[in-house]
């Protein structure tokens, strides 16, 4: 009974009193290091020739980051991928790559050569991802790998959509929670916009709210609505197929963040997109083909200071 009373007193002491506002920002200094892990499970249902075809993708990646400058409300970080494992399976083919896998497999050898190569990420103090630079340095790592050009092109065709500046910026835009530009208290809301971790002309308009806060942590929740910004833009799908997309849907985000550093400890994103993808004629396709599609994605991002 005494333990319960003590626990209650501590909980009341640590809780942010109702009506008291807090300011959430990313408080980092030069030299700070942390690790970002991402795990994604994705289910894709496509209706082709009147039949549903289901595909599954998984992604497991790790990025290590080091703050190199803090100035003018911006935080610039050097980033290096240290692990990448991906498995994509659909009714046409199956692709597996693993940076820690057997390097007798050419695809694994190529992916391993992309690890520990620097690129740069700049965020604002409130968490907006402003720039991602030098991602081409990851691809430069494969230039001297002793595998055929054909194998290199296969890897680029399968994961090239995931490893480019646009996709990295959108993915990191989910991991770094964007905070309000003013102090907030539980129940207050603010808005942001981010793309999806793929090179599609699709954005989510997200309404955020501070769910609750203590002296050490805050819980932030987001509800987003997806929309296609350019239905005529031609995108490249895995397998180097060209297409146009028209997608909409919703997204839910639940994040627990450290109030002192502002760094999220865990961000959970559940998203559902549906609509159509217009596969453009070329290669094995003699004509354009419109494919109804649903994409369901669950992603966990976790940050850990080093």
Image (cartoon, grey):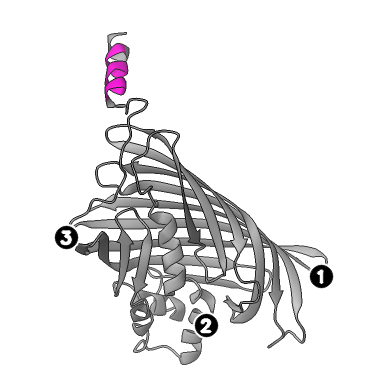
SS assignment at label 3: loop
Q: Position of residue 273 (x, y in %)?
A: 63, 58
Quadrant of res 283: bottom right
Task: Tell which residue pokes out farthest to the top in this image.
Answer: 1
Mark 1 and mark 3: Cα distance apart in space: 55 Å
Furthest residue to the right? Answer: 50
Please state if 157 lies on the left or on the right of 60 as rendered. Answer: right
Q: Is residue 208 above or below residue 294?
A: above
Residue that mark 2 sits on: 154
Q: Which residue is at the front of the view, 260 or 95?
A: 260
| 8 part of magenta stretch | yes
User: Which badge, 2 or 3, comes first in the chain's sequence?
Assistant: 3
In the displayed structure, does residue 224 sit left or right of residue 12?
right
Distance from disc 1 to disc 2, alpha carbons, whole Å, reads 27 Å
- Residue 274, given in percent of the width and then of the height, sits at 67, 59
Q: Does residue 241 lie above or below 3 as drawn?
A: below
* Magenta span of residues: 5-13
> Residue drawn at (69%, 87%), measured in percent from left and top?
282
Residue 215: percent from left, percent from top: 27, 33
**289 on left or right of 21:** right
Marks 1 and 3, the one that precedes in the sequence: 3
Q: What residue would you read off at disc 3?
A: 31
- Tell me the tag on residue 275: none
Q: Residues within 10 Å of mark 2 (few under 14, many from 20)?
A: some
Which residue appears at 36% of the width and 65% of the height? Answer: 130
Percent x, y of residue 43: 62, 58
Residue tagged by mark 1? 49
Q: Earlier in the sequence, mark 1 or mark 2?
A: 1
User: Any magenta on residue 212?
Assistant: no
Q: Residues within 10 Å of mark 1 (few under 14, many from 20)?
A: few
Viewer-side label of 1, 2: 1
């Amino acid at each position: 009974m005494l333990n319960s009373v003590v626990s209650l007193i501590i909980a009341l002491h640590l809780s942010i009193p109702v009506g008291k506002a807090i300011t959430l920002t990313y408080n980092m200094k030069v030299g700070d290091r942390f690790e970002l892990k991402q795990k994604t499970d994705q289910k894709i249902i496509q209706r082709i020739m009147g039949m549903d075809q289901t595909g599954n993708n998984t992604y497991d990646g790790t990025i290590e980051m080091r703050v190199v400058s803090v100035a003018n409300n911006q935080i610039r970080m050097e980033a290096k991928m240290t692990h990448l494992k991906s498995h994509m399976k659909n009714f046409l083919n199956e692709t597996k790559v693993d940076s820690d896998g057997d390097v007798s497999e050419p695809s694994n050898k190529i992916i391993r050569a992309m690890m520990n190569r620097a690129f740069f990420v700049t965020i604002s103090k409130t968490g907006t991802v402003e720039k991602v630079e030098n991602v081409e340095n990851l691809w430069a790592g494969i230039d001297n790998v002793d595998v055929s050009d054909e194998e290199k092109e296969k890897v680029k065709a399968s994961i090239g959509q995931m490893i480019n500046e646009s996709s990295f910026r959108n993915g990191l835009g989910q991991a770094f929670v964007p905070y309000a530009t003013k102090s907030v208290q539980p129940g207050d809301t603010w808005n942001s916009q981010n793309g999806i971790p793929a090179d599609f002309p699709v954005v989510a308009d997200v309404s955020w709210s501070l769910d609750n806060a203590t002296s050490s942590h805050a819980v932030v929740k987001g509800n987003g609505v997806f929309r296609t910004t350019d239905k005529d833009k031609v995108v490249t799908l895995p397998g180097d197929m060209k297409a146009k997309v028209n997608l909409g849907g919703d997204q839910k985000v639940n994040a627990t963040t450290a109030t002192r550093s502002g760094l999220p400890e865990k961000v959970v994103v559940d998203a559902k997109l549906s609509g159509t993808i217009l596969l453009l004629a070329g290669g094995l396709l003699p004509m354009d083909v419109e494919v109804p599609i649903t994409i369901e994605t669950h992603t966990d991002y976790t940050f850990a200071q080093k």
